[in-house]
Image (cartoon, grey):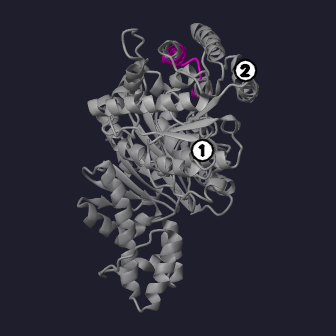
Amino acid sequence: MRPLIMETFDGLRQQNVLTVKEAKEKGKKVVGMYCLFSPQELVLAADALPVSLCGTKEDPIAAAEKVLPRNLCPLIKSSYGFAITDTCPYFFFSDLIVGETTCDGKKKMYEILQRVKPMHVMSLPQGPGKDELEWWERELLKFKQRLEQEFGVEITEEKLRQAIILVNRERTVMRELHQLAKNRPSPISGLDLLLALWLKGFNVDKEDGISLISRLVAEVKEIADKGKSPFAQDAPRILLTGCPVGIGSEKVIRIIEESGGSVVALENCSGYRSLDLLVDENPKKDPILALAEKYLEIPCSCLSPNPGRIEVVTRLARDYAADGVVDLTWQACHTFNVESYLIREHVRQTLGIPFLQIETDYSTADTQTLGVRIAAFLEMAREKKQ
Amino acid sequence: MLVAGIDVGSTETKICVIKNGEWYHAAAPTGWKPRESGEKIYRELISRIDSAERADFVVATGYGRIALPFADRLVTEITCHARGGVVLVPKARMIIDIGGQDTKVIQVGPEGQVLDFLMNDRCAAGTGRFLQVIATSIGLDVEELDEIAAEKEPIALNSMCTVFAETEVIGLLASGADRGELVAGLQQAIAQRIGGMAKRLGISGTIAFTGGVAHSRGVQRRLQDLLNTDVVVSKDCQLAGAIGAALIAQDAIES
């Protein structure tokens, strides 16, 4: 069974566009973001709206390929395609776009994208460490200054602290939702979990978003209390890790669940990757440092080394009683593709559960072969479970 | 007890029926109507060995498995090949299957349970279809390839894409290459491609080589040299999937 409130989520994308439009007409500034590394707290403290930009659909990829190489990650091509075809309303309403030097494909794409809109690119360090943290702190300060100049505002410490508390509250309620999937069987499908978590990026009013997710949490809890679930009792429980997934690029989750698996944990950018850590709210701590620490701990494969990912995969697999791990790699995403070897080794040897890496793009060309591999993987996970 | 396993492959449809411990099997080309070929081979074999209208339990596998409405359960070819491959070659701890349009490498436990697997992605490189296309372009039947390539030094081929390889082969023929050496080169290329997948999973012990391409002695020998372990081909190598499916059907009734 599906939570009734999910229907509200289904209509939310349309609704959100109208809300951004209204806010914009009232003079609100909008900052478009592509990535988890974008510090939305700074944008909120500048009295602007942080919004996620589109990049999870196949439609604009053909247009992007007039400029970008075909053999590039679909996320980058889709993001660029949405921007240049003017089909992403959030991009349209953005006064400033913020990007980061996460992967090679993205940072080079941003060089071309800045012809279309004002851009601020933050230089992300290569990995964790003390020097890297100082570097990242400076990048946050530069972004703060850019926002202040661009919008003629002052980002006060007070406003920044309020923003930190607000976004932490949003992360906490989303984490609570995600954790409901620990129930056996899970009371919520992986697809609905993705939809609810992914949409938060397009939510304009954080308070509205928090209250909506809280209502979903309450309803899913009721479903769990009644012992109900969209899945069979013995459905293999799958942890999905790897590249970012959103609505439009959810095909792997869809195939897993249509083949009888239950996706119980999303270790990706829409999912748990940003929810794990909260920004330190300690009033004695410099808020910029607190932000820098939190954001640099995001376990993305673009950082080297990236021990945090193995750690969070391990913890999620155990806490959510996963029967198997699926690692999704978008075509030409070198960092996740290479890192898959390490994840595979760890999952098989230390966790002792089946592992499947899937390398694909947004198209439907491989639906049939993916179906066979995923079904075989679920058969393997089921057998191992028994 | 009468159970059936049907493997509707891209090229051949195979069936295995177990009646009170006795095994029967048959195979026929799939053609372009997997449903009809599956149904026909099933009815024919059942009517030949029993007065029953249908088996007590039917497991369907292979790419055409969803086309069989009379199947009681659908199981992927990975699981079925693992189960059947170990029956054909009991010592095997890995199954390499090269069929009409895909290739798979499966690590298996002693009872034929799947421990890990890799499948080729998206294209027919190194499959039975690949051999067929190239054989045609050099004027031979698939069955003749082994003979002409025996004892020949392989010519290195760069393309594994079926379309590009055909172009490359035609170019090499035009420049006077020996057909036998060319075919040896093709076999070597197939062995290297699937051998790479096998090494990725990790090789320990005997390998059972199944699927239509396993009939090629040349590919088998080159794979064995490359992987430095026994690569065993059973005479029923094409039936591995159907046998596995029939055994799963038998389990379903017994449990």
Q: Is residue B221 above or below residue B26?
A: below
Can residue A261 be seen from the camera position used here?
no
Counting from the top left corner in percent of width and height, residue B99 is at 48, 60
Q: Secondary structure at mark 2?
A: helix
Please tell me which residue is depicted at 49% across the width and 51% down the height of the picture.
A108
Quick check: marks 1 and 2 in contact, CB under 8 Å?
A: no
**Magenta segment: does it hold B77?**
no
Q: Which residues are magenta?
A: A166-193
- Secondary structure that dominates the magenta span: helix
Q: Earlier in the sequence, mark 1 or mark 2?
A: 2
Counting from the top left corner in percent of width and height, residue A325 is at 43, 33
| Left or right of B66 in this view: B247 | left
Q: Is residue B15 above or below residue B181?
A: above
B160 or B2, which is in the foreground?
Answer: B160
| Left or right of B134 in this view: B35 | right
A347 or B44, which is in the foreground?
Answer: A347
**Magenta segment: does it hold A175?**
yes
A136 or B169, which is in the foreground?
Answer: A136
Counting from the top left corner in percent of width and height, residue B175 is at 43, 91
Q: Judge the density around disc 2: few (<14), some (14-19), many (≥20) Cα neighbours within 10 Å.
A: few
Q: Which residue is mark 1?
A: A79
Instruction: Give the Cα separation between the discs numbered 1 and 2.
Output: 26 Å
B77 or A316, which is in the foreground?
Answer: A316
Chain of the residue under the numbered disc 1 shown in the image: A
Q: Which residue is mark 2?
A: A8
Callout 2 amino acid = Thr
Q: Is residue B46 above or below residue A251?
A: below
Please tell me which residue is depicted at 55% across the width and 31% down the height of the picture.
A149
Q: Secondary structure at mark 1?
A: helix
Q: Which mark is residue A340?
A: none
Q: Judge the density around disc 1: few (<14), some (14-19), many (≥20) Cα neighbours within 10 Å.
A: many
| Left or right of A72 in this view: A279 | left
